Image (spheres, rainbow, N blue to C red):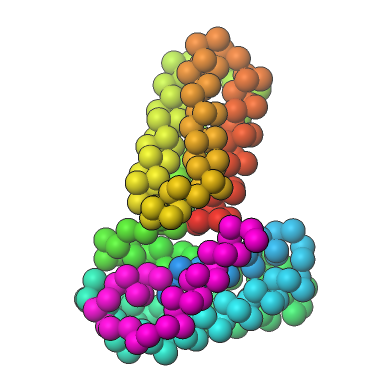
Amino acid sequence: MPFWVARVACLALALSGGVARGDDLADFNAAVEAVSAHNRVAIGYLRTGNADLASLEIDRLRDFWNRLNERFSGKRPNAFEGNALYGKLFTAVNARLVGAEIMLKTGRLEAASDALNSVRRDLYDLRKASGVVVLADCVRDANATMDALMIYNDRAIDWDKSEIRSGLAQKATSYEGFLDRCDGIASETVRTAPEFRRLVDGAKASLSLIPKAIATRDADLLHRVLIELRSFDNLLAFRYG
C-alpha cells in the first residue's frame, strides 16, 4: 500500500473516532490534515488530467470537510480565539468546493485546481494569523523559496556579477533552512518514513552541489541541480504540503 494511502486511512480513523473538545488544537489539526490529504491527491489528479479520479477525491474531500465543519465550526480551538479568519473559513471553503465541482464538471481542470489550491491558502492564512505551525505550512514556505531559487535556472547566467553569485548562495541556504525546519516540525512517524527521508535528504544532497556550481561557474551543473531540487520540492508539496 502506498504510504500516502495508508496516511489518509489513519487520518480518517482519527477523524471518525471520539468527540473533539473545542480547545483541542491537535484534534483540529488532525481533522484539517485529513481534509488536506484528499485535497492534495485531487490536485495531483487534476494536474495529470485525470478528471474521474479527481472527482472521486473531491467527493472524499467534501465528506471530510463536512465532518470537520460539524465538529469545529461552532466551537473553535483556543488557539484561534480572536482570529477573524476562523469564522470566515467555513463559508469560504464551502464556496471553493462548490466552485471546484462546477469547474470540474465543465471540463475546466485548471480552474478546479485553482479552487482547491485556494483552500490550502485559506488554511495557511488561518494558521499563520494565529501562530499555529504545521508541516504543511512549512512545506508551502519552502515551495515559495524554491520558486525564488528557480530564477537562477538560466544557462546564460552572468557569473561575473557578484550579486548573482551571492543571491544564488543565499537562496540555497534559505531553502536548506526550510528543509531543516520542516524536518523538525514533522511528526516522528513522518520524519522516519522512507519517502519523507528520500525527499528531504535528496534535496539536501542536491543543494550541497550549488557551492561547487558557483565556484566553477558551471551553468550546466546548476541547471541539473535546480531541476532535481524542483522535482523533490514538487513531491514534498504533493505529499505533505
- Residue 161 appears at what percent x and percent y? 48, 15
Q: Please identify the quarter of the rendering in which residue 142 is found.
A: top left
> Position of 104 compared to 85: left or right?
right
* Image quadrant where one finds the N terminus: bottom right
- Residue 6 appears at what percent x and percent y? 57, 64
Magenta stretch secondary structure, dominant: helix
- Could you tell me which residue is drawn at 27 percent across and 83 percent down? 22
Q: In the rendered image of this protein, does residue 117 appear above or below residue 237?
A: below
Magenta residues (range)? 1-30
- Could you tell me which residue is drawn at 22 percent across and 76 percent down? 78
- Could you tell me which residue is drawn at 70 percent across and 71 percent down? 54
Question: 88 or 54: which is nearer to us?
Answer: 54
Q: Please identify the quarter of the rendering in which residue 71 is found.
A: bottom left
- Could you tell me which residue is drawn at 48 percent across and 18 percent down? 211
- Residue 69 appears at what percent x and percent y? 43, 85
Asked whether 4 falls inside the magenta stretch, the response is: yes
Q: How many marks?
A: 0
Residue 122 in sight here: no
- Residue 50 appears at what percent x and percent y? 77, 66
Asked whether 45 falls inside the magenta stretch, the response is: no
Residue 190 in sight here: yes
Q: In the rendered image of this protein, does residue 196 appear above or below residue 125?
A: above
